[in-house]
Image (tube, helix red, strand yellow):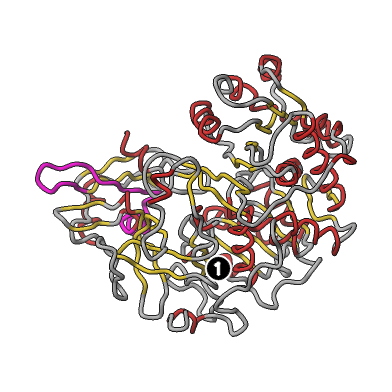
Amino acid sequence: MENEKWFELYDQETPKEIKASEFNSLLDVVDKTLEKFSGKKVLSSFGQGVAIEKIDDMSKKLASFLIDQVGLQKYDRVAIMLPNIFQYPVCLLGILRAGLTAVNISLLYNAKELKTIFIDSEAKAIITLDTFSNVIDKCYEGTSLERVFFTGLGDFLSFPKSLLTNLSQFNIHQSSSLENIEGSLSLKDAVYRGDLNSYKDPEINESDIAFLQYTGGTTGPAKAVAITHKNILSAMDQMESWFPGKLKERFEVNFLALPLHHIFSIVNFFLFLKWGASNILVTFPRSIDEIVKTLKDVKPTVFFGINPLFKAISEHRDAKKIDFSNLKISLAGAVPLHKEVHEKWKEMTGSDILEVYTITEACGFAAIKPFSPEGYEEFTGIPPSSTLIKVKGEGGAELAAGEIGEIAIKGPQVIESYWNRPEETNQLKTKDGFLLTGDFGFMDEKGRLKIVDRKKDVIVVSGLYVYPGEIDEVLKKNPKILDAASIGVSDSTKGQVVKIFVVKKDFSLTEDELRLYCDTHLKGGKAPEHIEFIKAIPRTNIGKVLRKKLRDL
């Protein structure tokens, strides 16, 4: 790896390659935290802090209950479907303490999607909120689920906040569903009934699967990415090496706004657990009022977010009341970071936002921007330590600088398999060991990566590749447009043509006016043949455009 050009952009203290991890598993990280940071309140939720000892005791009790009273065996799967509350890390650590595999599930999945995941993962149990009981009631039959653990938002808080929090969230119409579900148990009771004395550390090694992470993958329907302890430990070391001298044991305040069901957030959590940080769990990331209120109280030093979240905070009426004087690290992943968002955040906080190229198959850590005195720069990032990135053409050959092709990545954070998908696992990597990401982009002469679009979303107009993300950005620069997205639609002459969906900011905008704008700013088959004005662009909870839904309109 000595000849890669991007090394010239590394901090002088960032190694080209990470060393072998000091830990054999993520449980070693927890044990080290217990040893070094006794009494430290490493988690905070709803304004209440909890010491590492209490978190660990509860996780060991849960592990004992899962083994002794539920009868789960090593490597069995347990699903978690929770927001960022105390219960999530307790359950996460309890599952790992039992030698099991955690299946992280988004809160946005419907009953059909959940049943598919339960069947595919063969999960033996799920831990979720009582308010989701009606959804579970519709999909647990015909699956491998033996136990359904329910919890209220405030169950692990102290009284009276526990009662008030649960009363504010619980929907009385859900109670009947709880009674209908065979094998349903209270998570709080399970933890209480777990025998701490019977707990024994499982034999775990770095190659064991810690998490099943469901993703749309590079092609086809959702599948489970099998993430090992080594994958997470490697991503932690890579991230840590990117901030030499910036982190201070015990004193970091990590603002955990990204849901813990995202693997990048899991890496974040374990890294800052290792550093003895105060991890602030943000339960309602869509409530910007609540986020701003919390930020005013906690003075974060670390903030991992996404472009829409940084934008919403910086535009909030009380943004100037937040004390960002301690903020050292701001990271944005999942979706592209916009220049205007970066500049507004920098003006408000004095901190640059570093963009991260995140894919699930690489534990959310494929490329990252270095710190730069230039501030925002128009590229996505460079490979972290022990990572190679190539841009490959259709025949698999490496392309020259500036040529657009498929991004391929190789590194210890990259997975080795998909769960129960032998064919896709066999095709996971190229002969030279690179994962084809399904993203199109290019590298410049300095080794800096620029993502252009998803391979599956590329539009082919008369044999020419057209990238919808590029079109979207041009459209959103129009002051009369609030939001926009583009797709390809079939055309008998050209194969495909561009169709755009536009949300008006100024209702005086007409189709003729928009066509003139597109003809002026979009060349080479990029100008749309079809235009449709809609009320909102369908997006995921992290801001990605759901182009499949647009195609179905």
Observer-nearest residue: 301 or 417?
417
Residue 279 colored in magenta in the image: no
Q: Which residue is the extreme one toward the front?
A: 203
Position above or below: 511 against 470: above
Q: Residue placed at 32% from the left, 59% from the top?
A: 470
The count of marks equals 1
Position above or below: 411 against 530: below
Q: Is residue 34 left or right of residue 395?
A: right
Residue 249: tell me if it is visible: yes
Observer-nearest residue: 419 or 459?
419
Residue 482: tell me if it is visible: no
Observer-nearest residue: 527 or 264?
264
Q: Residue placed at 32% from the left, 40% from the top?
A: 533
Give the image location of residue 185, x and y in percent. 75, 25
Q: Which residues are magenta?
A: 470-497
Q: Is residue 446 left or right of residue 193?
A: left
Report the residue marked by disc 1. 354
Residue 477 colored in magenta in the image: yes
Q: Residue placed at 52% from the left, 63% from the top?
A: 356
Amino acid type for the residue under numbered disc 1: Leu
Helix, strand or loop for disc 1: strand
Q: Residue placed at 68% from the left, 50% from the top?
A: 291
Q: Where, quadrant-wise, is the C terminus in this rendering?
A: top left
Q: Is residue 542 left or right of residue 436?
A: right
Observer-nearest residue: 187 or 451?
187
Give the image location of residue 12, x and y in percent. 59, 85
Position above or below: 176 against 245: above
